[in-house]
Image (tube, grey):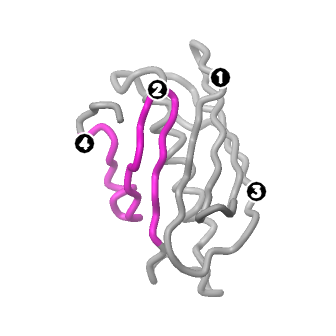
Amino acid sequence: MMDVPKSYVESAFSQLLGCRLQHLEEGVAQVALTLTAQLRNRGQKLHGGAIFSLVDIAMGLACSASHGFDQQSVTIECKINYLRAVDEGEVLCIAKVIHAGRRTLVVEADVVQGDKRVAKAQGTFAVL
């Protein structure tokens, strides 16, 4: 795992959701999220917005791990496919930079629970 100051990888928002960095290497980030009562939708499943936020957080960390934490990047678009509902437990988002240009990065992410894929996403980030 990359040796990066905790303040660089944890935002107040990611802490509010309960996201936990599991692994970080050049262009790759793995972030976990445990389903809590506050993250449930009206159907008592993990809210799609929580999954999307997890994806965005992991993708942003993968970008920072690609171009360096001294430079910022922001999401300019993201598409997600929700594949299965989550009733309980923990999910893991694995985000990987698949293109690192000077001005933009393209990142893909899988959200998994055990050996089952929960969501698939792809996003574009602008380097500031």
Mark 4 or mark 3: name the one nearer the start of the chain: 4
The answer to whether the residue labelled 2 contacts the one labelled 1, judged by CB atoms less than 8 Å apart, is no
Mark 3 or mark 1: name the one nearer the start of the chain: 3
| Type of the residue with mark 4 | Lys
- Establish if 45 lies above or below 80: below
| Type of the residue with mark 1 | His
**Magenta stretch?**
6-34
Residue 90 as seen in the image, left or right of residue 81: left
Distance from label 2 to label 1 (Cα)?
A: 12 Å
Distance from label 4 to label 3 (Cα)?
A: 30 Å
Disc 1 marks which residue? Answer: 99
Q: What crowding class fits label 3: few (fewer than 14 Cα within 10 Å), some (14-19), or many (20 or more)?
A: few
Q: Residue at x 58, y 17 (%)?
A: 103
Distance from label 4 to label 2 (Cα)?
A: 16 Å
Query: Which numbered marker is on residue 26?
Result: 2
Q: Is residue 68 magenta?
A: no
- Establish if 6 lies above or below 88: above
Q: Residue at x 34, y 49 (%)?
A: 11
Q: What crowding class fits label 4: few (fewer than 14 Cα within 10 Å), some (14-19), or many (20 or more)?
A: few
Disc 4 marks which residue? Answer: 6
Query: Which numbered marker is on residue 81?
Result: 3
In front of the other: 72 or 88 = 88
Q: Residue at x 33, y 22 (%)?
A: 70
